[in-house]
Image (tube, grey):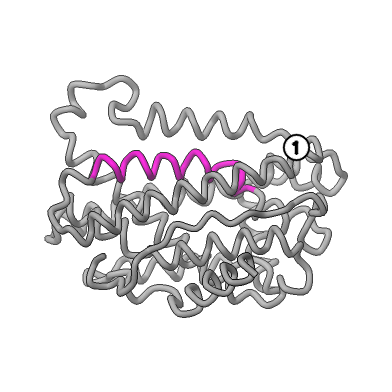
Amino acid sequence: MTSFIDHQIMTRRPKFDFSKTPIHWIANDAFNTHVFNSLHVFIPEVEYWFCRLSNQTLPYVKDDNLRADIKAFIAQEAAHATAHKSARDYLSNYKIDPSAFTATIEWLLRNVLSDSPLGMESFFARHKQDWLAFRMGMIAAWEHYFCFIGTWVLNAGDLDHVADPAMLDLMRWHGAEEVEHRTVAFDAYRALAGEGLKAYVGRQAAMAIAFPIMVVVWLKAAAHLGKVDGTVEGQKLGKKSLPRLIWELDRVGRKTDRLPTVSSLLGSLRLWAKPGHHPEHDGDIQAALRYVTNRLSLEKA
């Protein structure tokens, strides 16, 4: 464990029953629902990519505690991928096929963010550690936001009254574990890139690429699900442009406690931009651990 994680990160593999989950499981609303459902579309492939790159990082890590944390991070991310894959059965129950969008994510990870992007093997082989560090910086950037959203969903009281309990449980369990391992990808990046000015600039460059990718993939995946979900409301969602989707996200976030606001997402960039930033202070770790501990107790009861 790093000095910022004072407990052993656990691998948990909870079971979820989505057999009674309605097609629009947040307030019978397509937009709210598919913004969350988009995680089922891209999270499994992205989390497995996280695992592969974290495994590649291990030989560069000298600190035994950080090595243990990275291994636990890999195990948790693999469990998240498995859980969201199981949620695709819920989508298939309603004949919602996300495979076209998922194929795009797979292409991006295997061809653009691979070890030799677009077949340029010799260049990236010469800069292997730098390219690995940059991609781990992207992972740390995404983990920054997963921690933010994880904290948000744990505290989103409106969802208790309008969301399907099983799907909300998946989102909160995943979010709680993102808060739990919030420092690991950041520290793995530092093990590769160091802690000087070059590392700081690299971290900001990684966020400059990672943040737009996150927004586009997240919201366009939601629109794709609406397009193929077979409902009138879903069809309206599927026709929205990216600017309209961003506007709608902010509108819902300001009006209700069912989605985060765009301003809160942008505001979190200020923390990342600070030269001395470290995610040890991000999120509500005590709330996250209470959730996973209570959930584990209920599952065993």
Coordinates of residue 82 in the picture (x, y in percent): 55, 44
Residue 81 colored in magenta in the image: no
User: Residue 36 falls in which quadrant of the image?
Assistant: bottom right
Name which residue type carries label 1: Ser
Q: In which quarter of the image is the C terminus?
A: bottom right
Residue position for label 1: 92
Q: Give the range drawn in magenta.
A: 38-57
Quadrant of residue 155 within the rendered picture: bottom right
Taking depth in this image into account, of 282 and 1 the one nearest to the observer is: 1
Q: Can residue 239 be seen in this view?
A: no
Q: Main secondary structure of the magenta part?
A: helix
Q: What element carries label 1?
A: helix
Q: Give the number of callouts.
A: 1
Expressed as whole percent of the image width and height from the top left, the position of residue 195 reads 14, 61
Q: Which residue is drawn at 82% across and 53% down?
A: 20
Residue density around tag 1, few if under 14, some if 14–19, many if 20 or more, within 10 Å = few
- In screen coordinates, is 283 left or right of 278? right
Q: Which residue lies furthest to the right in this view?
A: 232
Q: Nearer the viewer, residue 121 or 213?
A: 121
| Residue at 59% in and 67% down | 260
User: Residue 54 magenta-drawn?
Assistant: yes
Q: Please give left or right for residue 32 compared with residue 102 in the image.
A: right
- Residue drawn at the location 45% of the way across and 62% of the way down: 178
- Position of 94 relative to 124 (above/below): below
Q: Position of residue 11 (x, y in %)?
A: 44, 57
